[in-house]
Amino acid sequence: PAQDLILDVSNIEVIYDHVILVLKGVSLVVPRGGIVAILGANGAGKTTTLKAISNLLHAERGEVTKGSIVFEGEEVQALSPNDLVRRGCIQVMEGRHCFGHLTIEENLLTGAFTRRDGKAAIREDMEKIYAYFPRLKERRHSMSGYTSGGEQQMCAIGRALMSRPKMILLDEPSMGLAPQIVEQIFEIVRDINAREGVSFLVAEQNTNMALRYATFGYIMETGRIVMDGDAKSLRENEDVKEFYLGVS
Ligand code: ATP
C-alpha cells in the first residue's frame, strides 16, 4: 500500500519579485508521524520552501509558480495561512517570533486564536504544554522579550502547539542557541512527535543535530534537493560527512 503522507510537495518553483527564481523544482514528502529535516547552507532555500508550504511568501513578494502542495490529501495553495492553521499545519518562524511585550502565558494564548472549543480545553492544553516545557511554566508571567533565546524558542513552539496542529513546520530551531539548549529543544520535539503524533518538517543548518532526531532528511543547494535519504544513511554518507558534518 502507498505510504500515508501528511505532506506531499511536488516540483514547486518559487519566484521572488517576478524574476528571481529561488526554488527550481523542489519535491519532498513527510509521512504521517515523521520528523523530516531539510538541510543545507544559509541561502539554499529552506526557509522559502517552508514559507511556500504555509503560504507566507506573499508578504515578501514571493510566489509559487509551478508544482503542487498537498496536505492531508488536498491541494492547499489557495488557502490562507490561517486556513492552513485551522486544517492543522502551522509554521514556527525562524527567529522565534514571540510577542516580546506579552508574557509567556499570553503568547501561548495567542496561539489558540483559531480555536472555537472554549476556555477549559485551551487551559488544559496550556497545562500540557507546560508539562513538555517546565521552563515555560516557571517563566509564564515574564514578558517573553526578557526571557532567554531558548525560552523564546520554546515559547514559539508552545504557541504553535496551542493550535492543536497535525504538522509543525519548524524553521531553524537551533539558531543562535547553545548546543545543550538545542539538544533540549530537539528532545522535546521528539517527545511531542511520539506522544501527540505531530509530524515535523524541520529546516536546519545544524545537520549533525537534525540528523540525530529526524527520521529522514533532504539536502538542499541553491534551490534544489541534491540528496535525500533516511537519517542514518545520510549520517554515514561520505559526502554529507565532508560537506555538512564537518568531519571526513
Ligand atoms: P536561511 O538559513 O538564511 O534561512 P535558507 O536556506 O532558508 O537560508 P532562503 O531564506 O529560503 O534560504 O533563501 C533562498 C534564496 O532566496 C537566497 O538566495 C535569498 O537571497 C533569496 N531570497 C530570500 N528571500 C527573498 C526575497 N524576499 N526576495 C528576493 N530574494 C530572496
Image: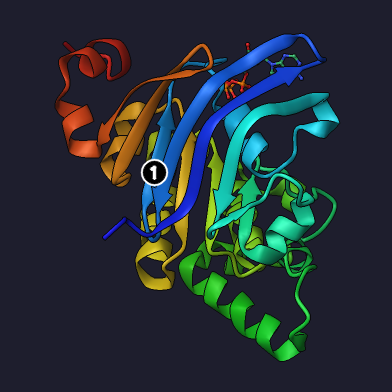
Q: Residue at x 70, y 56 (%)?
A: 84
Asked where in the image residue 95 lies, by quadrant, the reply is top right
Who's the residue at 66% across and 12% down the image?
Answer: 21
Identify the residue under disc 1.
Answer: 36
Amino acid beneath label 1: Val
The image position of residue 148, as x and y in percent, is 61, 44
Q: Is residue 124 above or below residue 162?
A: below
- Quadrant of res 241: top left
Front one among 53 and 119:
53
Horizontal relation, residue 4 to residue 230: left or right: right
Image quadrant containing the C terminus: top left
Q: Pick out the residue farthest to the front.
A: 1
Along the viewing direction, whichever of 18 and 49 lies nearer the viewer: 18
Name the quarter where the N terminus is drawn: bottom left
Q: Is residue 79 above or below residue 136?
A: above
Can residue 83 be seen here? The reply is yes
